[in-house]
Image (cartoon, grey):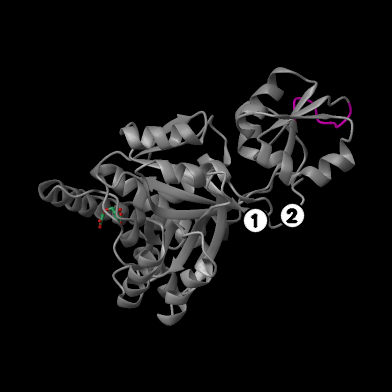
């Protein structure tokens, strides 16, 4: 297309945008200075910098008051970045998650904390729990549930054996792409990806690459890295991973379920981070087991009904006792500071052989 002379109306509008950007920059710095003062106060009090319930309230408040034309859904990602940058002036936030760069866990971590964080890349979920327990990271991010494949069993099992608790959640639309050094499907001998991704793309792989071996590796980004080294290999990963490893997107969105979503839990150590306060839209996660007698699971649900507390999730996992015993992972709506939630929890505790609150946290505000 031939370049035309710049339209004077366009130039004038751009000048006005530049002026607004300068105002915004000055306002953001005013906000940043206030956050620094908050940081000093918190240091004097010995309290932590990151307050997920406060951040959730800021975002909810602004979404409610947004007069447009900015889209309601644009508010959360913009303010998450602003708050991330402000928080970084109080103290660095070290976040552990499954690496290498380009994983969906990284996307979840950046979506929740914003990009002003220190990244602690881990080889698997066990390492994320370990880094967060041992203090090498302030927070951990692990996948807990996928909308097409169900629970991420390793993460749930690890909740039982560590002192960590959940301080937040975030979910992502997970779009898988077939990545390769070349831009065609022919000649792919193996597809390297995380077992969850291979499962989420099972139908597509059977149809389009029936001969190719499906090779499970530690992460999708690791699969992409392997594909960048060998033209016979393909990976299944995000477009960010394609950029990271210089690969072509041979086929986009190959997951069998168009609405494929993964939910991630944000973990912290209770000795270093307080339980988030009530935000108004909270979730409480528990893991319990019941005595092995008739009606025990029914008895679990009675206190919830009696106190009008909604259950949004009920998942069972084998207790590995060899006795057909189970742990139940339960999500309730509400915060223990609400009297009905606290009463229901006390009755539940009395009905259970094992009872552990995994955390109370603001619902995902995306
Ligand atoms: C500034 C604060 O500290 C952090 C940064 C926030 C922000 O930038 O709005 C909000 C909550 C905290 O995670 C605060 O607690 O108000």
Image point (14%, 47%), residue name: 46
| Residue that protrudes farthest toward the top in the picture | 229
In the rendered structure, the answer to whether residue 33 lies left or right of residue 63 reads left
The residue carrying mark 1 is 147
Quadrant housing the N terminus: top right
Ligand 1 in which quarter: bottom left
Q: Earlier in the sequence, mark 1 or mark 2?
A: 1
Badge 2 element: loop
Q: Where is residue 365 in the image (x, y as percent from the top left)?
A: 46, 62
In the figure, residue 231 lies in which quadrant? top right
Q: Name the residue nearer the viewer: 232 or 283.
A: 283
Badge 1 element: loop
Tags 1 and 2 touching, CB below 8 Å: yes
Q: Name the residue nearer the viewer: 247 or 166.
A: 166
The answer to whether 190 is drawn above or below residue 316 in the figure is above
The residue range painted magenta reads: 180-186
Marker disc for residue 325: none
Mainly helix, strand or loop, the magenta region? loop
The residue carrying mark 2 is 257
Residue 184 is one of the magenta-drawn residues: yes
Q: Where is residue 47 in the image (x, y as percent from the top left)?
A: 18, 50
In the figure, residue 205 lies in which quadrant? top right
């Amino acid at each position: 297309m031939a370049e035309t002379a710049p339209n004077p109306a366009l130039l004038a509008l751009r000048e006005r945008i530049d002026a607004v950007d300068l105002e915004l920059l000055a306002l953001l710095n005013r906000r940043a200075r206030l956050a620094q003062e908050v940081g000093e106060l918190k240091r004097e009090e010995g309290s932590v910098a990151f307050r997920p319930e406060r951040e959730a309230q800021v975002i909810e408040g602004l979404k409610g008051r947004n007069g447009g034309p900015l889209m309601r859904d644009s508010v959360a990602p913009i303010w998450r970045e602003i708050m991330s940058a402000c928080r970084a002036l109080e103290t660095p936030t070290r976040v552990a998650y499954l690496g290498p760069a380009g994983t969906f866990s990284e996307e979840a971590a950046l979506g929740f904390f914003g990009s002003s964080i220190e990244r602690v890349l881990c080889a698997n979920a066990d390492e994320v729990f370990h880094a967060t327990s041992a203090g090498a990271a302030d927070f951990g991010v692990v996948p807990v549930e996928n909308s097409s494949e169900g629970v991420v069993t390793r993460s749930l099992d690890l909740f039982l054996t560590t002192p960590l608790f959940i301080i937040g959640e975030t979910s992502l639309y997970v779009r898988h792409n077939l990545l390769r050094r070349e831009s065609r499907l022919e000649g792919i001998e193996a597809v390297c990806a995380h077992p969850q991704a291979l499962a989420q793309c099972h139908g597509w792989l059977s149809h389009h690459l029936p001969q190719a071996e499906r090779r499970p590796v530690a992460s999708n980004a690791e699969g992409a890295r392997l594909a960048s080294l060998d033209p016979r290999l393909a990976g299944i990963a995000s477009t960010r991973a394609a950029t990271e490893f210089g690969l072509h997107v041979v086929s986009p969105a190959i997951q069998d379920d168009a609405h494929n979503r993964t939910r991630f839990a944000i973990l912290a150590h209770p000795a270093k981070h307080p339980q988030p306060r009530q935000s108004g839209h909270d979730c409480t996660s528990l893991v319990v087991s019941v005595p092995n007698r008739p009606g025990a699971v029914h008895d679990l649900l009675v206190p919830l009904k009696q106190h009008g507390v909604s259950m949004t999730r009920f998942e069972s996992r084998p207790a590995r006792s060899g006795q057909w015993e189970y742990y139940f992972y339960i999500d309730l709506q509400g915060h223990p500071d609400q009297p009905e939630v606290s009463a229901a929890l006390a009755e539940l505790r009395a009905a259970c052989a094992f009872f552990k609150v995994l955390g109370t946290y603001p619902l995902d505000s995306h």
